Amino acid sequence: MSILAIAVTLLIMIALAKPVGLYLAAAFDYAPNRINRIFSPIERILYKISGVREESQSWKMYALSLIGSNAIMIFIVYLVLRFQGMLPLNPAGIANMEPTLAFNTAISFMANTDLQHYSGESGVSYLSQISVLVFAMFVSPATGLALVMAFIRGLTGKAAGNFFVDLIRALTRVLLPVAFVSALLFVFMGVPQTFEPAATATTIEGTQQEIARGPIASFLAIKELGNNGGGFLGVNSAHPFENPNGLSNLLQILLMLLVTTSLPFAYGKMAGSIKQGRVLFVSMLMMLIVMTSISLTAEHVGNPALNALGIQHDQGSMEGKEVRFGEAQSAFYSVITTAAETGAVNTMHDTLTPIGGMVPLVNMMLNTVFGGMGVGFVNVLMYAIIAVFLSGLMVGRTPEFLGRKIEGKEMKLIAVTLLVQPFLILVPTAIALATNPDTISNPGFHGLTQALYEFTSSAANNGSGFEGLGDATPFWNISTGIVMFLGRYVSMVTLLAVAGSLAAKKPIPQSSGTFRTDTAMFGAVFVGVVLIVGALTFFPAVVLGPIAEQLTL
């Protein structure tokens, strides 16, 4: 039954991908169309209020606008968190956030990571939740959507566009309407939406219990849709108030995948060939299915040592999982939340089997199994360019992508982008293991995986954690904050530079020797490049962590 539910979920996802992708392509098209006629009058008012000029920017100005505006917003979020104890809408009397934790949290939410080194219900006030954090949860994915649209325009020889126009369009045409409807659906399913303080209940033993609540439904909607992932409550979507039943679990999964799975078709439409997008979509779908199969098998088999003793649970490993969802839906959720770079959890990833925990770790390392809001698909297109480049070298031709030559300048920028992520993951992990072993709760291979997962989640802007890690310390707050910032913004600038360089080149007519990027062969080459270039980079670390742990069971 669980496998059937997973299959139905994937079929719904596939059915939604193309129409949503075509809508996105039209929504970010500067040419007159029906969507522009509907939204433009409202948006022009916003442009006038904010002083935005509807003129195209160079890739450098686009990047400067993106980084500058996000940096200012990070500072605003930081200030509110630092002084939340003195501000209104704080019925629980939550204190000002500690400086290094505020630094980490401000970067985390603006970097679309939502890594939380605090417990959701006790770390921030209602004002902080609904103002700066939810604000960041809208602006951050809108930034990612703006980036991917500018990148696609560059690849197809068009001007980058205007960052602020794209940002506002992402908010008004995609995130706000879908999040509003989704929040109403979550309320209908039983998710609380209130400004009342925590409820006090008397248990059957006669003791008093504080039950946290708040404006959870609205927070939850953008948390999933925007691939944010932060929890209003400490245990995230494992809490019945954030995820009451199977239907809410299904809606959360579909929201996580809604935009990320549609971007290949938006790209195909903007590139003038839907087949281009379909090839990338199918390639990523195959990787998602393989990852899901590995995770489901690992969690169903459970611990081989316990199986040998005859004491393993009949339905696989249920440690750390909600009985509302079972091991199959818990494992599937862990795959989706890391494939879509969301970071929400409905189970504790620290309690997954070693191979079950390896799958979300590898998803984040690759960051191409659909990937997060916009930024993930930019990584996909980067790997597509690498695939074309390597294929061209093998046959002795100058590589071409969408009719433009791929030359040394573009490949140097891509090489820098490729090297940034392993540097941000492996170097801090080594430093943490050498200098802060006391904060790692498990010895041996599992402890290494805990630290590796934390920095991988930070660099990939995912935000989920293995937990059990004593991460609420200045070291972890500052180190992961720096990794989140660099992991988010360095690749944005370098890949915008790639798009700007390609846009400036004259198109080359397609010939019989052109390596076509709309065929099944290209899809196979693309997947091979992702696995060879991406996976082998981290293979030694994965061997020392989850694989070694699995072999010791």
Image (cartoon, rainbow, N blue to C red):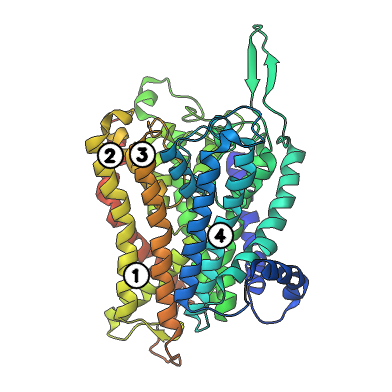
Q: Would residue 441 appear left or right of 149 to someone viewing this image?
A: left
Residue beneath disc 1? 414
For disc 2, the marked residue is: 432
Residue 127: x %, y % from top left = 64, 40
- Label placed on residue 260: 4
Which is more N-terminal, label 4 or label 2? Answer: 4
- Residue under the image location 26 percent in, 49 percent down: 427
Q: What's the amino acid at mark 4? A: Thr
User: Which residue type carries mark 2?
Assistant: Ala
Compare marks 3 and 4 and give the one earlier in the sequence: 4
Earlier sequence position, callout 1 versus callout 3: 1
Do tag 3 and tag 2 residues touch (Cβ < 8 Å)?
Answer: yes
* 1 vs 3, front mark: 3
What type is the residue that disc 1 sits on?
Ile
Q: Residue furthest top?
A: 206
Q: Quadrant of residue 238?
A: top right
List x then y, in percent, for residue 95. Answer: 54, 30
Q: Residues within 10 Å of mark 1 (few under 14, many from 20)?
A: many
Density class for disc 2 (Cα within 10 Å; few <14, some 14-19, many ≥20) is many
Counting other residues with Cα less than 10 Å from the Cα at mark 3, is it few (<14), some (14-19), or many (20 or more)?
Answer: many
Label 1 to label 2: alpha-carbon separation = 28 Å
Q: Quadrant of residue 174?
A: bottom right
Q: Is residue 499 left or right of residue 13?
A: left
Location of the N terminus by quadrant is: top right
Name the residue located 73 percent from the left edge and 72 percent from the top edge: 40
**Element type at marker 1?**
helix
Q: Residue at x 61, y 54 (%)?
A: 138
Q: Disc 3 or 2, which lies upstream in sequence?
A: 2
Asked which secondary structure carries label 4, the reply is helix
Q: Residues within 10 Å of mark 4 (few under 14, many from 20)?
A: many
- The residues bearing labels 1 and 4 have C-alpha atoms spaced at a distance of 22 Å
Numbered circle sitting on residue 476: 3
